[in-house]
Amino acid sequence: MALWNGGGGAFPAAAVLVAAAVAALLGAGVGATKFDDVVQPSWANDHMVYDGDLLKLRLDANSGGGFVSRSKFLYGKASADLKLVPGDSAGVVTAFYLSSAGDKHNEFDFEFLGNVTGEPYLVQTNLYIDGVGNREQRIDLWFDPTADFHTYAVLWNPSQVVFMVDDTPIRVYENRQNATVHGHHHRSNNATNASTSTASPPPFPGPQPMAVYSSIWNADDWATQGGRVKTDWSHAPFEATFREVRVDGCAWAANATDGDAGEVRRCSETSWGKEGRYWWKEKEMSELSVHQSHQLVWARAHHLVYDYCVDTDRFPVQPPECAGR
């Protein structure tokens, strides 16, 4: 298995646990790629296509396609180097996300909403906690995501969930269950902490092992201008292209159940494990750095186009995690 050390950008790595680097050796439909160490088709196998050292998910009038990671992990970082469907992609959605299993699952979503030629892609993020979602935010991007590869990543630890685009945080969901998490004080202001001390704190994803998924499908009933613009099948097939998929996290034992208490303890209660140091649980990973906080403010000020926290039509009573923002 090719190893990735998770280094670079805002979140340096010190240990490698699960990894996928992309270099492919597939010729004439025979052989294997290094993608195979990390992901496998999850549906419509023939719509997951290798092209040299790249992996493509394909959508046509018959089907979309998807993949899933071969193993699960609890806390860490998952990322993909991805080039989105070019040209007229209205109605097409490409997703890269993490999800646990069951009705009470947790899920962290990137959904890339295609658009008519010349109009910007929108990137929708969402979180499901114990099976409940409806936490959508949307941004436009400061580059053309169809012209080259860009890195989309989710960092997840007991303190926060961070969505990143090319190492720029675009969304942070903090754990406000306690004023301190693992001895580190959160950035929540005193008023917020005081208000949550007398009420139920906002929910935060519990320790459920996650798999990594990606898929492409037709969503022209809602994805582009609220479903007013439909998929133009004359442009099919639509292809999202991956150069690399990486997972650096606490690898869940293959023979363990999803609720295995020993695995939860191993991944949750220490910064060390059999694989080495869990860099994502270091103190500096429990909140954004000053530079990252400035990046987040910039991204939201210039590129946020929808936030469920201020959608009073959907939520006349503001969701608890939005308080103080």
Image: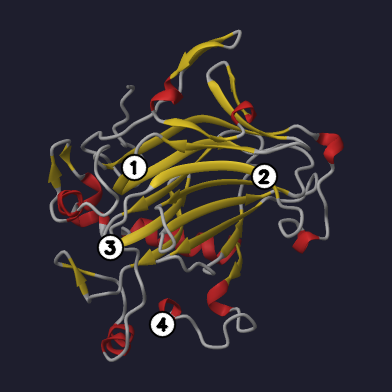
At label 2, the amino acid type is Trp
Q: Of callouts 1 and 4, which one flags the residue occurring earlier in the amino acid sequence?
A: 1
Query: Image quadrant of residue 295?
Result: bottom left
**Residue pointed to by mark 4:** 324
Q: Is residue 256 left or right of residue 168?
A: left
Is label 1 in contact with label 3 (beta carbons under 8 Å)?
no
Indicate which label's residue lies in the foreground, 4 or 3.
3
The tag on residue 12 is: none
What is the residue that sits farthest to the bottom in this orientation? 198
Helix, strand or loop at mark 2: strand
- Report which residue position mark 3 lands on: 159
Q: Amino acid at mark 4?
A: Gly
Tell me which label, 4 or 3, sits earlier in the chain.
3
Q: Classify 10 Å Cα crowding around label 1: few (below 14), some (14-19), many (20 and above).
A: many
Q: Earlier in the sequence, mark 2 or mark 4?
A: 2
Mark 1 or mark 3: which comes first in sequence? 1
Please identify the quadrant where the C terminus is shown.
bottom left
Decide which of tag 2 and tag 3 comes sooner along the chain: 3
**Compared with residue 240, is residue 298 higher up or lower down, i.e. above or below?**
below
What is the distance, in whole Å, between disc 1 and disc 3 at their CAs?
A: 20 Å
Q: Farthest residue toward the right?
A: 234
Q: Dot 2 corresponds to which residue?
A: 217
Which residue is labeled 1 in the image? 72
Counting from the top left corner in percent of width and height, residue 271 is at 15, 49
